[in-house]
Image (cartoon, rainbow, N blue to C red):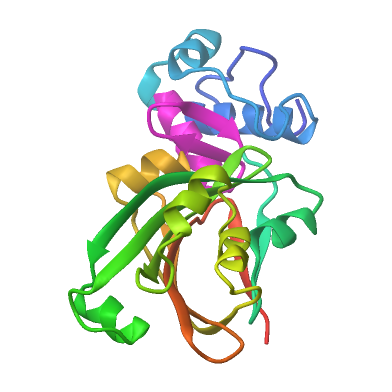
Amino acid sequence: MTDGTPPQGQLARRQGVALWRQIQQAIEAEIAAGQRKAGERLPTEAELSARFAVNRHTVRRAMEELEARGLVRIEQGRGSFVAEDVVDYRLGPRTRFSENIRRQNRDPEGRIVRIAEIPAETAIAEALRIRRGRPVILVERLALADGRPVVLGTHHFPAARFAQLPALLTENPSITAALAACGVPDYRRQVTRITARLPTPEEAELLQQARTRPVLVTEALNVDPAGMVVDVTIGRYAAGRVQLVVES
């Protein structure tokens, strides 16, 4: 073939092009032609090894190249998938997940992972302007777009002000709605810090991504219209699916 892509299941051996490269080109051509849809699970290593009559190491090298090119995402324990379009997630003074996602014609969803009351550590206490050790309501929430995890958020609320939150979030996972019911109809980001790191095993599992793929981490301080601190939020975004856009 003129583009160097081998016919279905056939590789040109001993002709100067590595076998893994030919496999990568074949799968890339299928994605470009629409034969493999965004989000579709790709054949397993064993199935691709049988198709191309090569060992799994050769297939793995081809998949690693496809992942590096942003065409495939590899999820630990789940397999390989054709990469979806990246979500542009806008970070501004008034960031709301559902609004952000609906603006891109996607379906937002929120799932509460954990709610607990814990003593405030030093950094959280200082940010919330409370004494160290005072009770804080910790809410861990997974946010999804079109059924795919986008961000895992850990929120810290002063328990003295938001004692109703656990019960409200049990009925409805919307933090914005819960805060409105607590007398905070609006809030805004005062400060946001952005870093990147590799995910923990738990984060990788919840975000359905490989542990070798980084997460974007945001630390945000939210305040109400009167300037009182509402919460400190730490968000971990799946870097392969999200592009953070900072707005003034």
Q: Which residue lies furthest to the bottom in this view?
A: 226
Classify residue 57 as left or right of residue 133. right
Classify residue 130 as left or right of residue 40. left
Taking the spot 55% from the left edge, 67% from the top edge, the residue there is 182
Residue 50 falls inside the magenta stretch: no
What is the x, y in percent for residue 168?
A: 52, 52
Can residue 194 be seen in the rendering of this structure? Answer: no
Taking the spot 65% from the left edge, 27% from the top edge, the residue there is 40
The residue closer to the viewer here, 198 or 192, is 192
Q: In which quarter of the image is the C terminus?
A: bottom right
Classify residue 77 as left or right of residue 81. left
Residue 72 falls inside the magenta stretch: yes
The residue closer to the viewer here, 126 or 144, is 126
Q: How many marks?
A: 0
Q: Is residue 64 shown above or below 68?
A: above
What is the x, y in percent for residue 243?
A: 61, 63
Q: Is residue 14 shown above or below 53?
A: below
The residue closer to the viewer here, 63 or 23, is 63
Taking the spot 47% from the left edge, 46% from the top edge, the residue there is 112
**Magenta extent:** 58-82
Can residue 227 be seen in the rendering of this structure? Answer: yes
Q: Quadrant of the N terminus?
A: top right
Taking the spot 37% from the left edge, 51% from the top edge, the residue there is 115
